[in-house]
Amino acid sequence: MVLAGEVADLRVIALLDDYAGFETSLYGQHGIALLVELYSGGETRRILLDTGQEAAPILHNMEILGIDPAAIDCIFLSHCHYDHTGGLAGILRAIGREIPVVAHPELFRENYIRKPFLRHIGVSRENSPEAIRAAGGHLLLTGEAFAPMPGVFSTGEVPRRVAFEDQAIGTYNLEGGRLTLDNLRDDMSLVVNVSGRGLVILTGCGHAGIINIINQARKIAGIRRVAGVIGGFHLIEAGEERIRKTAAALAREVEGLVVAGHCTGPAACSELARVLGDRFQLLHAGKTVVFS
């Protein structure tokens, strides 16, 4: 399936990241929230990709940046983990009207880690389906590629075909009273087709593997040109070989900027900076990237 459409201009603003930036009054927190502003035909539409651990630091940063929560038209959740979904209900209440919330059907599964101790890391009770609806969220759950607006689409479930991209991160699902290894099928990304530039790929954690995600985006769009990649790549626990191969592949496959943060990790960011030079930028709260 090829999803058509394009936008004239794209602006991505990091409302939250692990790193607050330098000499700033913005808050940082382990998590991510990207405001995706789409300009086309004299209109502006805004999608919020992920909602951090909680709403408060995001709303604080939005106030500092002069962004009204009511301007958000849609929320897209990249996967179930608490540092991407925790602020959902609070942000919906701040928006103050019903908007769509796009996510995978397995978003609400019981998800855990076992090290250093058993801990729930999935969607919290404060963000249950009932709480989301009560706060104004209209849930649209799909594992297929989906276009919430013209020129932007989700990857849907991403096939895992790149040999060096090992996605196992030691998370488990509680199923029938047993913990079973989680394959993170719900990991999805957003893709924007910018007129004259190509695809811009926006990730939450990129658990599916950033090169797998690029391949899926190209397949869905029928477009090979990748203008940029922004988000978390979950290389923080990756070995040297995977980091090296990922950096080399990104240098080949992405024409423009690679902006990485959140769970990418210092070793991977260092290698990306070495390989990509000034095409690499570090994500932080308040970081703004424009494609036009």
Image (spheres, helix red, strand yellow):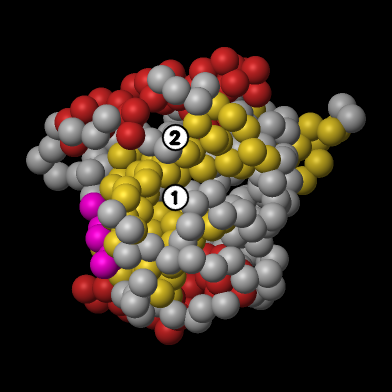
Residue at x 37%, y 46% (from the top left corner): 45
Q: Quadrant of residue 14?
A: top left
The segment highlighted magenta reads: 288-292
Q: Nearer the viewer, residue 291 or 51?
A: 291
- Residue 6 percent coordinates (x, y): 43, 66
Please tell me the numbered disc located at residue 144: none
Which residue in the protein does label 2 denote? Answer: 51
Toward the bottom, the furthest residue is 252
Residue drawn where x is 44% and y is 80% of the image: 225
Q: Does the magenta-highlighted stretch encompass residue 242?
A: no
Q: Quadrant of the N terminus?
A: bottom right
* Residue depicted at x 23% and y 44%: 286
Q: Look at label 1 and name its amino acid.
A: Cys
Check the image and report above or below for 62 versus 198.
above
Q: Amino acid at mark 2?
A: Thr
Mark 1 or 2, closer to the camera: 2
Question: Which residue is the site of mark 1?
Answer: 263
Q: CA distance from mark 1 to mark 2?
A: 15 Å
